[in-house]
Amino acid sequence: MLKLVGIAGSVADQSYNRMLLKFIATHFSDLIDLEILDIDDVPMFNQSDDQTDGDAVQFLNRKITQADGVIIATPEHNHTITASLKSVIEWLSFKIHPLSGKPLMIVGASYYDQGSSRAQLNLRQILESPGVDAIVMPGNEFLLGDVKTAFDDHNNLKDDRTVGFLKETIGKFTQFVKVINSMNDKADEGWKKEDLESHGTVDTTIKGLDMHADDWVEQAAEKTHAAEGSDYVKLDRGVLTVDQLNWFLNSMPMELTYADDNNQFLYYNHTMDVKDMLAGRTPGSAGNPMADCHPKAAIPHVQQVVHMLRTGKTDLFKLPVPGMGPDKYIMHYYQAMHDDQGGYRGINEFVLDLMPIVKYYLEHTGQVLAKDPNAKADAVSGASSHAAAEKAKPDDVSGASADTEKPAEKPATDEVSGASASADVETKPAAPKDVDSVSGASAKD
Amino acid sequence: MDKFIAIVGTNSDNSTNRKLLQYMQKHYANQAEIELMEIKGLPMFNKPADKQVPAAVTDMAAKIEAADGVIISTPEYDHSAPAVLMNALEWLSFHIHPFVDKPVMIIGASYGSLGTSRAQAHLRQILDSPELRARIMPSSEFLLGHSLQAFDETGNLVDEQKTAKLDGLFADFETFVEITKRLKNAHAATAQEVRDLDWDNL
């Protein structure tokens, strides 16, 4: 399902635009996964006091970068958008540009008839400026006027035609997001910059050692005076000795590998000889740059996977790696790891055989496997075509021939847009009021 | 002598818009008294339920109210006026209305060649909204492009053509202020209308 973020362009305590986004998030949760982002903590933009690296701006930067698309709900103040929303956009177009190329939809609610029409037009102009460079969906204006009477006691939109039109608009936006992002994917060459030789360093890199050395672990431990044996380590949440930590990790029912954000392979839970492992590793490999652990032909694929995890396109990349006979179904999982601030910190790779789990489940529920006649990909042996053909045996650190195809979830395109075909563009539920001389009405949110 | 408030449309420490207004302050000292007004440091407008406006804003409103006219020099961020200027105008139209029928001259300076053309159009639209309702001098853009190169070391405009244009526009603005004084037949009604405008009870 598409991962979208929503920004309500108001920092007022009571905001109908936030209410509108919440309605969209809950009411259309079958179409989109919409997370609503707060902008209350974002300071006023000031080019002489750069706070791009502050938590509030970085939070938005990360969430927007990782999202497939963005929805902005704007009020209208004085014929334009709010200063608080404009300030956010200025931060996001100063030193960083997370909205660049991002599919974006504008909606808006206002107290008066106009439903934020001028603010929306103005916002469109702002978003299309070169520093922002968002790809705003054309047409499909959703203007919610007379907003104080638009919601019922449960914060649901009352008018069915309005909901129908909104659904149609959201449906079109999901299509728009897919089209724009497929264009972006073709253009995105960022993965080529993934350095699997680990030339750089990150704050945890142990410097001055030969990463290729067989005794890298011993050298690194000595250099850092690493805790070992009966030394205690404080964890979140608990305290263990290093021995206990090892017993714990070594008894995990899967093979674990840790690669850091510098693409350096730092650790695996060493319980078996290489020939008995599902994805073979040797004690000498720990400390190696990831490039050492892959055949050359597989490098671009690995770069693409790492890039997807680093940029948040996906947090979990799954890859079946067959080739060990029909009694095993080996899965390689690449889970992105993040620090408390949400920054990318590397890959937790875990490899396991799913067959014992499947067999157990079938036995204990009295079921058998059967082919799904409607399945597009063969459910059982899916993915065998690529991985198997390309290489004889699975390599070290990662499933080398990681298919570049994006994992999982291709949301079925659905009925959305057909649904309530022609709610007309005017979404105002009530009959127009008398427009008095004030008319223009830049209704405050 | 006319008294003008000149709003620096940015919170930046180094602003060529501030420089431009400082130049005007000096250059037109014989014609008008120009006081620069900074908008840095106001809280983010959040439409407080208690309708309280910060003291700094009421001070600004009083000065604007007392002035014969207002000059605003705006930078352009993202094809529009900066958030910090929009924020000041939001406060200055929240249950106070110092701009109603106030003559306003819009100018702007930018590093690039366009000289804030789009920000000025945006600002015009904002100042024309129901709770601001300023009297904006029509058809009188002053766009100062390449503003980093526009001033000499004493802060004077280098380009003679630009200077002549600004002289003309400033004289026009003084005339516009006079004319506007005669455009006050509807002022009482307009002011009342704006005071009565209550978005909470539409």
Image: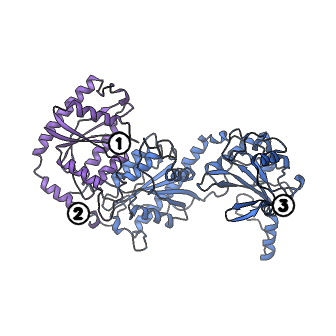
Subunit of mark 2? A
Q: Which chain is purple?
A: B
Q: What element carries label 1?
A: loop
Task: Report which residue position mark 3 lands on.
Answer: A328
Query: What amino acid is found at the position of numbered circle 3 in the picture?
Result: Lys
As measured in the structure, the alpha-carbon distance from the residue carrying label 2 to the one carrying label 1 is 39 Å
Return the x and y of residue A69 as percentages of the image width and height: 52, 52
Task: Report which residue position mark 2 lands on.
Answer: A434
Subunit of mark 3? A
Subunit of mark 1? B
Task: Report which residue position mark 1 lands on.
Answer: B10
As measured in the structure, the alpha-carbon distance from the residue carrying label 3 to the one carrying label 1 is 66 Å
Q: The blue chain is which one?
A: A
Quadrant holding the C terminus of chain A? bottom left
Residue A199 in which image quadrant: top right
Return the x and y of residue A73 as percentages of the image width and height: 42, 57
Q: For the point 81% across and 58% down, which residue is it?
A: A229
